[in-house]
Amino acid sequence: MTDVTEADWVSRFADEVIAEADRRSPGKQIVCASGLSPSGPIHLGNLREVMTPHLVADEIRRRGRDCVHLISFDDYDRYRKVPAGIDPSWAEHIGKPLTSVPAPPGSSYPNWAEHFKAELVAALAELGVDYRPVSQTQMYTSGAYTDEILTAMRGRGRIDAILDQYRTKGRSVKISDKLSAEDAAAAAEAAEGSGAASEDEGGAGSSYYPYKPYCSVCDRDLTTVTAYDDATTAMSYTCECGHAETVILRDHRCGKLVWKVDWPMRWAFEGVVFEPSGVDHSSPGSSFQVGGEIIGPVFGGVQPIGPMYAFVGIKGMAKMSSSRGGVPTPGDALRIMEAPLLRWLYARRRPNQSFQIAFDQEIQRMYDEWDALVSRVAAGTATAADLAAYARAAGTAAGPLPTTPRPIAYRTLASIVDITTGDEEQTLRIVRDLDATDPIASLDEARPRLDRAANWVLSYMPAEERTHIRDEPDQDLLATLDDNQRESLRMLAAGLDDNWSLDGLTTLLYGVPKRQLGLPLDVKPTPELKVAQRGFFALLYHLLVSRDTGPRLPTLLLALGADRVRKLLGG
Ligand SMILES: [Zn+2]
């Protein structure tokens, strides 16, 4: 595997994490962590919560150190609201643990949390993310945290005092006040996917308790702890449903610590050394900051190194949301791009830099950039930063990720699929003609990139940009052409057969106006030549697809076949 110890942001965090881990407990397995709430679709912004520690953990493993990446699924959090598009009757489940809520109608999964976890789990496998899943339902209901829960209850006065500093200051400056409307929307969206959405801190004042039981009758958390005895661990609670009871907390398996206490408890329990958080967790009085104050005095642990990560925006979302609804998920991205490209987008930017993932035409430029990077790496001209980002994208400590054997430019593939509407036989014919010296034998050589480009054309290419090839020549237009234009079409038609490849047709197309102007084929473009070429290309688009522009002309010609091109050009 490529050595990537060159100092990029991942490397620097790995240095820091290893030093901190060795300071705390030398020789022990190093723990990096992420937390995700399967309260709904886990979107691409949440993926940064996974990719940041993944990349750091992967770098630590590349250095030969034992490192685990825990992904905590906060599936024991309460079900907060019924999302748009779901039967309103699901409202009866509000307040229950996510694993106790039925999956959305039509799902094959046993409950709400599992339904939304499943797509992410599949995407993480494709992305090469090596992690250990931790279900908080499993942890809480098995009693794994019993000692920690009793510790938190004993320390409730201290916790209450820490939380109180921020209560009295009030929440006058909310982080969202300082953000643009778009970032605030993303913050709200991010908060939806995290425990930060649970504002309940467990009451205040003399009756403060950091533990919230789920009611043994209605299964909801509409409960209030009314009394607790440290010696016997007897805890009394009432529920809005009318139920009231006293349980022995030491044996109780149906409740959880409130979020701001739950998080530092888990840092201590798991010995987490690295866990990043979104900006929604990093403001004054936020769960990350408060957790840092709670973990030492209450749980005797140390707060992890926790960089804040910025938002991930989606380009082309406006167009998309009308047709699909909601924010795209990693699974949506992997249907239109290969795993290394998606990994690269997260690896090349420092966590505090925001970036966008394109679902619109920009995806073609993103792919061009990636291909250019791959070429630089192959040619040995890549910078150290390029090499590091490439190596993190193309594989992990476990080995390289699958690639496309013959990576034809994404924009070319998109054009071909657009023109052929995905017809395999036609596609193979065109793809074979792209490179006459080393023709592709089977479409499998162009996969999976071809399939990703096809999915993009079918799902995200705007209908008005799809290409519709003329069935019959445009006789009206042909009748208006001057001699010069007729000559240019004759020169093109005459050269098709001898130049039937992507490169050949490119040279032919640019060459026709040069020859008409009496210029040598290797001439540098002059303003006059550029005007002539633009005019020639526009004429061809009108004759072939009845528009000013379209897919790149060499690709379009290959797709049509020489006979059809000659026919539409009036030959
Ligand atoms: Zn109840």
Image: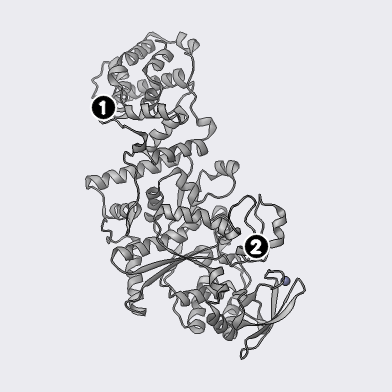
| Image position of 109 with respect to 286: above or below | above
Front: mark 2 or 1: 2
Mark 2–mark 1 Cα distance, whole angstroms, equals: 65 Å
Nearest the viewer among 355 and 456 is 456
Q: Position of residue 20 (x, y in %)?
A: 35, 75
Nearest the viewer among 108 and 316 is 108
Q: Position of residue 18 (x, y in %)?
A: 33, 71
Is residue 513 rendered to the left or right of residue 211? left
Nearest the viewer among 534 and 80 is 80
Tag 1's secondary structure? loop
Q: Residue at x 45, y 17 (%)?
A: 543
Q: Quadrant of residue 318?
A: top right
Identify the residue position indicated by label 2 in the image.
Answer: 80
Q: Position of residue 150 (x, y in %)?
A: 57, 83
Give the residue furthest to the bottom. 231
Tell me, yes or no, if residue 354 can be seen here: no
Identify the residue position indicated by label 1 in the image.
Answer: 524
Task: State ligand 1's quadrant.
Answer: bottom right
Is residue 254 rendered to the left or right of residue 44? right
Q: Quadrant of the C terminus?
A: top left
